[in-house]
Amino acid sequence: MAFQLPANKKMQVRIIKNGITMDSPGKLTCLLIATAIFVSAQSVYPIANMFKPEATPADSIFNVSMLMLAICAAIFLVVGGLLAFTIVRFRRRKTDNSNEPVQVYGSNRIEIAWTVIPVLIVIVLSMATARAVVEVQNKRMPPDALKVTVVGHQWWWEIRYPELGIVTANELHVPQSSVAKLAHTFLKLQSADVAHSFWVPQLSGKIDLIPGITNSMWLDPRRTGIYLGNCAEYCGTQHANMLIRVIVDTPEDFEKWAAAQKVNASADPQLEAARSAFMALNCINCHTVSGTAAKGTFGPDLSHLMSRTTLAAGVLPNTAENVRAWVKDPQAIKRGNLMPNMQLNPRELDEIVTYLASLK
Ligand code: CUA
């Protein structure tokens, strides 16, 4: 199987390796490379529109921010307007013969006004914010809520559905909530190493994942689709490459997805050789493949690897070619990540990739 990275990914890999330099390719080429990365980035990292909330917690935040924006815009217009008026109306004129304007000291009425009005504005803004916080935080968990534990790792997301017995990574599937059938997903957020932050702008606010502490958040997305989020707390070199996808399915699609995830990993008898090769390597110390001897929990669960859309927490589209590039040298793709280059020979690499690509 001949392997080729897509051209734009090759550039990206080279830039990650070398850092962006202006020397050899020249500025125009650099611009082209930047454009290529941006265009490729469009497909792998579509940008979430935070002004289009699609779940109740995001609505609350959106409403408070619009209120803040409106009040601040009004203050800006009043202050800026008064300032502009004053500058024009009281500018120095040719007929002015003294150097200094008339000096005015103190006006109780004005001073009371500019103390009381800002105090009232601050009270209104804090009450509105407190109300939104309470609305989101004090939400009681409905008995039929889907429970999910999200664990932040450097630099990927472990996603567990304890009641369904599903473990996956980087892609959180949740059912759509509709008027006919409300569906809430309650998240427990934890960290395996350093502080991370779960942020899917269209669905909820940012919630930190702190070692030793369990935080919580809930979602009730109204529309099916893929909602992109980022880690929003600097957590090391690859913080920017710690993307999360929330995939909102119709309740039927969610059931189908969950049923497929619950099944043990594919054990195609024709792939016995490839499977044995995988089981004989160190891969199994860090990764789990359900129904096999691979029970590591340090890295992402691979039982249904190919059912996910991206690799390495959103860095590459999940194709057999990219799995090969990743296994061959993970550090070339996501430098600093905790998976070492296993120095596999070409035969081992073929077998590992054949096996991983069968894990649908
Ligand atoms: Cu995890 Cu930033």
Image (spheres, grey):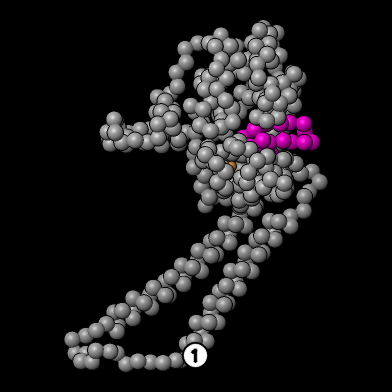
Q: What residue is pinned by disc 1?
A: 109
Tell me if 292 is positioned left or right of 36 in this view.
Answer: right
- The amino acid beneath tag 1 is Arg
Ligand 1 resides in the quarter of the picture at top right
- Image coords of residue 103 (percent x, y): 35, 92
Which quadrant, please, contains the C terminus?
top right
Q: Residue at x 60, y 57 (%)?
A: 61
- Image coords of residue 280 (percent x, y): 68, 13
- Image coords of residue 111 (percent x, y): 49, 86
Q: Which of the 4 quarters of the picture holds residue 228?
A: top right
Q: Count up the numbered dots.
A: 1
Report crowding for label 1: few under 14, some 14 to 19, many 20 or more residues within 10 A (C-alpha): few
Which of 104 and 58 lies nearest the eye of the viewer? 104
Query: Considering only vertical position in the picture, is 74 above or below 64?
Result: below
Q: Residue at x 66, y 46 (%)?
A: 209
Specify whether residue 287 is in view.
Answer: yes
Q: Main secondary structure of the magenta part?
A: strand
Q: Residue at x 53, y 65 (%)?
A: 68
Q: Residue at x 77, y 31 (%)?
A: 165
Q: Is residue 174 magenta?
A: yes
Q: Which of the 4 quarters of the picture holds residue 271?
A: top right
Specify whether residue 177 is in view.
Answer: no
Query: Considering only vertical position in the picture, is 130 above or below 147?
Result: below
Which of 321 and 62 lies nearest the eye of the viewer? 321
Dot 1 lies on which element? helix
Give the magenta-colored segment's residue range: 157-177
Which of 220 and 265 lies nearest the eye of the viewer? 265
Q: Is residue 138 magenta?
A: no
